[in-house]
């Protein structure tokens, strides 16, 4: 087991019941990125903010600077030494992650023209490929727009990882992997989701940019 995961459980012993599912989620995410896949994320309210947060940790250096490999640095020199060096020194290694909550023009159009509870499902249908992962946040596990997204992901062969509260709701049956934190209150659940996805991002960074 990862040292980073051990440290999480030392700090948050109440998350011990989630140990196996966190490790399983990491392995699925790692395999997805190794296959050239991407991560899609969806959630509502505070969970929407969590989606944005995860993207911020994966698309740039989190705990390490993620300097570009020499081969990639050299390719940037086609723009001249000075400009190439600037680009190479400021780019960082990235793991492709897309927050589905960010697409305001699309979401408002779809909500208005089609069906608000299908907005994430439509995005998963458009973006999702079998090598991808869909990470969904729902404290109840029953949010309709999240459930529909998971159903579409399942039909496409996209690995779906759910972060929920203790019950798991409908997502318990739809997700390939579900991390159910042992709380029922929304603030308590969300307060535990944050250290879990922080640890997952750290583990991924260690795996790809050590």
Image (tube, rainbow, N blue to C red):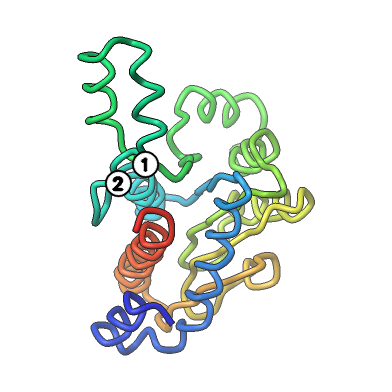
Front residue of 208 and 6: 208
Name the residue: 57% across, 31% down. 111
The quarter of the displayed image where residue 188 is located = bottom left
Q: Is residue 175 above or below residue 91?
A: below
Rounded to the nearest whole Å, what is the CA distance between mark 2 and mark 1? 5 Å
Q: Which residue is mark 2?
A: 66
Q: Which badge, 2 or 1, comes first in the chain's sequence?
A: 2
Q: Is residue 67 above or below residue 134?
A: above
Q: Position of residue 157 (x, y in %)?
A: 75, 53
Name the residue: 36% across, 41% down. 93
Front residue of 162 and 114: 162
Q: Which residue is mark 1?
A: 93
Front residue of 11 and 31: 31
Question: Pointer 2: residues within 10 angstroms few (<14), some, or many (20+)?
Answer: some
Tag 2 secondary structure: loop
Q: Quadrant of the C terminus?
A: bottom left
Name the residue: 37% across, 75% down. 185
| Count of numbered circles on the image | 2
Q: Position of residue 29 (x, y in %)?
A: 54, 59
Q: Quadrant of the N terminus?
A: bottom left
- Horizontal side, residue 107 vs residue 45: left or right: right
- Horizontal side, residue 70 vs residue 19: left or right: left
The quarter of the displayed image where residue 194 is located = bottom left
Q: Are marks 2 and 1 in contact (CB under 8 Å)?
A: yes
- Horizontal side, residue 67 vs residue 164: left or right: left
């Amino acid at each position: 087991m990862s040292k980073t995961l051990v440290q999480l459980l030392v700090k948050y012993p109440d998350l011990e019941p989630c140990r196996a599912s966190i490790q399983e989620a990491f392995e699925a995410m790692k395999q997805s990125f190794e296959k050239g896949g991407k991560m899609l994320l969806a959630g509502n309210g505070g969970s929407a903010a969590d989606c944005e947060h995860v993207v911020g940790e994966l698309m740039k250096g989190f705990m390490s600077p993620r300097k570009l490999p020499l081969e990639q640095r050299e390719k940037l020199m086609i723009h001249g030494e000075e400009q190439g060096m600037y680009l190479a020194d400021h780019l960082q290694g990235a793991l492709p992650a897309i927050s589905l909550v960010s697409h305001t023009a699309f979401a408002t159009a779809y909500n208005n023209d089609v069906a608000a509870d299908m907005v994430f499902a439509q995005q998963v249908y458009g973006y999702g490929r079998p090598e991808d992962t869909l990470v969904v946040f729902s404290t109840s596990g029953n949010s309709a727009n999240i459930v529909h997204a998971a159903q579409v992901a399942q039909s496409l062969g996209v690995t779906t990882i759910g972060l929920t509260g203790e019950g798991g709701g409908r997502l318990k049956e739809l997700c390939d992997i579900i991390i159910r934190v042992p709380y029922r209150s929304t603030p308590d659940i969300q307060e535990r989701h944050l250290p879990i996805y922080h640890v997952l991002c750290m583990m991924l960074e260690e795996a790809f940019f050590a």
